[in-house]
Structures are given as C-alpha cells and as structure tokens.
Amino acid sequence: MTATKITALAATAAVALSGLVPATGMAKATGTGKHTVNQKDEYVFVKPAMGFSGTMFKGETFKVERLSKSGKYAYGMAYGHVNRHVWIDAGALTRKR
C-alpha cells in the first residue's frame, strides 16, 4: 500500500469511530440515580460479572447506588421481577430524566 492509501484508510477509520463515541457515552451509567435498562435483556449478578442472579428487560428501572472501580458495573436496586440489590453492566443503563 502506498502512503496515500494508508493515510486515507486511517482518516476514514477515525471518522467512523468518532461517530460511535457519543452514542456509547450517553448509554452508560456514570453516577447514582434512577436509570432505565436500554438492552432487550441484561443479566444481573450477585458480584460484578459473577453469580448469575436474574435477567432485567428493556424499560425496567434500576436505581444505581454505586459503581465499580472500573466503572463497568453498577450496583443498586433492580425494580421489576428481579426486585433486589444486584450488579449490572453499566453500559446497559440510560439515565432517566
């Protein structure tokens, strides 16, 4: 490949990836408060990613009380049929307005 083709490919990839960043940034729990599950279904756990505890579905409410150190998982009260304190992937939550 020539340098021109490589530069064009890199620029195209950068533009494509920059379009994804705002969408994923808006769909993640970043603080405490009430959130809505934005996935069709999402597993919840006893510990972050360990000990399956149930499934939440799109539109159900999750009240975030704290986030894991990495920010990948949120702990809080799952309302609906789960109805207990669990951990969930923070990327599956959208803040309620």
Image: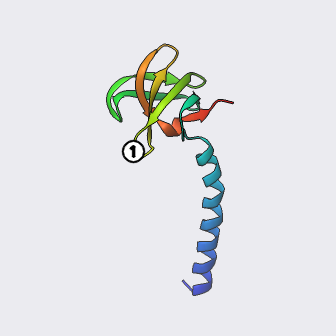
Residue at image mark 1: 69
Horizontal side of residue 47 vs 70, given as left or right: left
Instruction: Pick the quarter of the image with the N terminus.
Output: bottom right
Q: Position of residue 36 (x, y in %)?
A: 59, 28
Q: Where is residue 50 in the image (x, y as percent from the top left)?
A: 31, 32
Residue occupying image coordinates x 66% and y 56%: 19
Is residue 90 shown above or below 65?
below
Task: Please state which of residues 8 and 52 is positioned toward the viewer in this rendering.
Answer: 52
Q: Position of residue 14 (x, y in %)?
A: 61, 67
Residue occupying image coordinates x 40% and y 25%: 86
Q: Where is residue 85 in the image (x, y as percent from the top left)?
A: 41, 21
Location of residue 59 by image quarter: top right
Instruction: Kindly identify the amino acid type of the residue bearing the numbered disc 1.
Output: Lys
Is residue 63 shown above or below 6?
above
Location of residue 60 by image quarter: top right
Residue occupying image coordinates x 58% and y 73%: 10
Location of residue 17 by image quarter: bottom right
Task: Please state which of residues 11 and 27 is positioned toward the viewer in this rendering.
Answer: 27
